[in-house]
Image: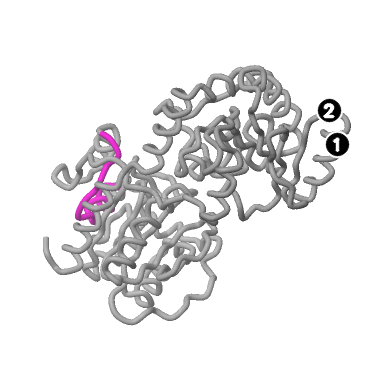
């Protein structure tokens, strides 16, 4: 990427970014692929891609992302380098990646320029629209076109995204509409023996799960459960409070004050046929309750600041999703669920009971669960094609 007036002006505004001072661990020996996720959402698909490269090809991966991510075997997690000529040079000198894969459309012109000098192949995946890093917006003549010219291929989410990249200066032949890559699986584990035993105990009882329920939403969920019992008299509510230290007091209160037949898992009680509310308080068991519950309500989404649990967890395990209007950090995935009619939204607390009754109908439960699972697992073919392209480029093929 030759120097330009736009790149020169851009570099004059250089500044260090938050997290840029994090120490760099030693580079692993041999090959290395660099993946850059500008957002938490982008990291989901890149982590799935990283897993393929690590497990199938034995290629270590460096993943840069401004969000904090839990460790992954074979993946080095780092904040992105500041997009300045000095930082870009130091970053590439240290890591020496054989290939770089960017996501969504964020362009880092300083580091792209240095990558081109080193003849590092560049790919853009899950491309939405081209943009500069946050806080670096401005008029830089020809900068966007030059930066996009560095990419061997741009995989656009849809035709609108492809037009945005072509209009910004990407080569027409380099842009293709491929759709979304698959995301890292959100399926939580559970002990199969425990699941099987509880499944036998629950037999054919209808079950729903209130996941990570804040105190402010307890009344709405219990009112919805009373409504649901009118439709399915053996209906069981499994309730996990957001603060598990409240579990015992909650069980005592709703049993004494509201007359519910309650069992509490931490007292080794089981949901017998008379139990109406089963309060669970081990966050390690979310995978168990999603598997046992055909319907899950995501706490925090009704009157809170946003869902306190990732909706992909329920979707990946086949539990139909009930949710309120507040999505928080999971807004993008909720938007995909809503677009696919793969979840049942509720606007007001007093609507939750009717929504529960609607979703509990067996045909609707299956439809919502299947649609949500399809959204959660979409994109496997796109990921496979991306892996093949990466292999070819790393092997020196066009």
Lower position in the chain sequence, tag 2 or tag 1: 1
Residue 385 image point, x, y percent:
21, 52
Helix, strand or loop under label 1: helix
Q: How is the image coloured?
A: one colour
Q: Is residue 24 above or below residue 340?
A: below
In this picture, residue 338 sits left or right of residue 345:
left
Q: Nearer the viewer, residue 274 or 243?
A: 274
Q: Alpha-carbon distance for marks 2 and 1?
A: 7 Å
In this picture, residue 16 sits left or right of residue 237:
left
Residue 45 image point, x, y percent:
38, 51
Residue plotted at (46% across, 23% down): 364
The residue singled out by tag 2 in the image is: 258
Q: Are marks 2 and 1 in contact (CB under 8 Å)?
A: yes
- The disc placed on residue 253 is 1
Q: Nearer the viewer, residue 60 or 66?
A: 60
Magenta residues, start to end: 144-158
């Amino acid at each position: 990427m030759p120097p330009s007036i736009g790149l020169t002006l851009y570099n004059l505004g250089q500044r260090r970014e938050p997290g840029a001072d994090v120490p760099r661990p030693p580079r692993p020996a041999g090959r290395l692929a660099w993946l850059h996720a500008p957002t938490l959402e982008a990291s989901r698909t890149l982590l799935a891609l990283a897993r393929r490269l690590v497990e199938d090809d034995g290629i270590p991966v460096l993943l840069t992302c401004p969000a904090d991510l839990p460790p992954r075997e074979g993946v080095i997690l780092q904040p992105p380098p500041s997009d300045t000529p000095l930082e870009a040079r130091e970053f590439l000198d240290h890591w020496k990646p054989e290939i770089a894969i960017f996501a969504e459309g964020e362009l880092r012109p300083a580091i792209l320029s240095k990558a081109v000098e080193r003849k590092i192949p560049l790919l853009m995946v899950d491309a939405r629209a081209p943009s500069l890093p946050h806080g670096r917006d401005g008029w830089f003549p020809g900068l966007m076109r030059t930066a996009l010219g560095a990419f061997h291929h741009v995989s656009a989410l849809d035709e609108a995204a492809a037009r945005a990249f072509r209009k910004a200066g990407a080569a027409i032949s380099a842009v293709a509409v491929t759709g979304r890559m698959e995301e890292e699986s959100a399926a939580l584990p559970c002990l199969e023996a425990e699941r099987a035993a509880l499944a036998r105990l629950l037999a054919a009882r209808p079950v729903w799960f209130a996941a990570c329920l804040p105190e402010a939403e307890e009344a709405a969920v219990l009112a919805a459960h009373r409504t649901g019992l009118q439709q399915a008299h053996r209906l069981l509510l499994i309730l996990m409070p957001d603060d598990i230290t409240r579990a015992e007091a909650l069980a005592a209160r709703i049993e004494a004050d509201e007359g519910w037949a309650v069992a509490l898992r931490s007292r080794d009680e089981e949901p017998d046929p008379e139990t109406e509310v089963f309060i669970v308080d081990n966050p390690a068991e979310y995978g168990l309750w999603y598997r046992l519950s055909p319907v899950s309500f995501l706490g925090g989404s009704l009157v809170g600041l946003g869902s306190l649990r990732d909706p992909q967890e329920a979707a990946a395990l086949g539990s139909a999703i009930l949710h309120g209007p507040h999505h928080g950090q999971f807004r993008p995935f909720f938007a995909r669920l809503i677009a696919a009619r793969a979840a049942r939204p509720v606007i007001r607390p007093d609507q939750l009971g009717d929504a529960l009754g609607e979703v509990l109908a067996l045909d609707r439960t299956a439809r919502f669960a299947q649609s949500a699972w399809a959204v959660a697992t979409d994109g496997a073919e796109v990921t496979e094609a991306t892996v093949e392209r990466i292999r070819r480029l790393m092997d020196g093929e066009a």
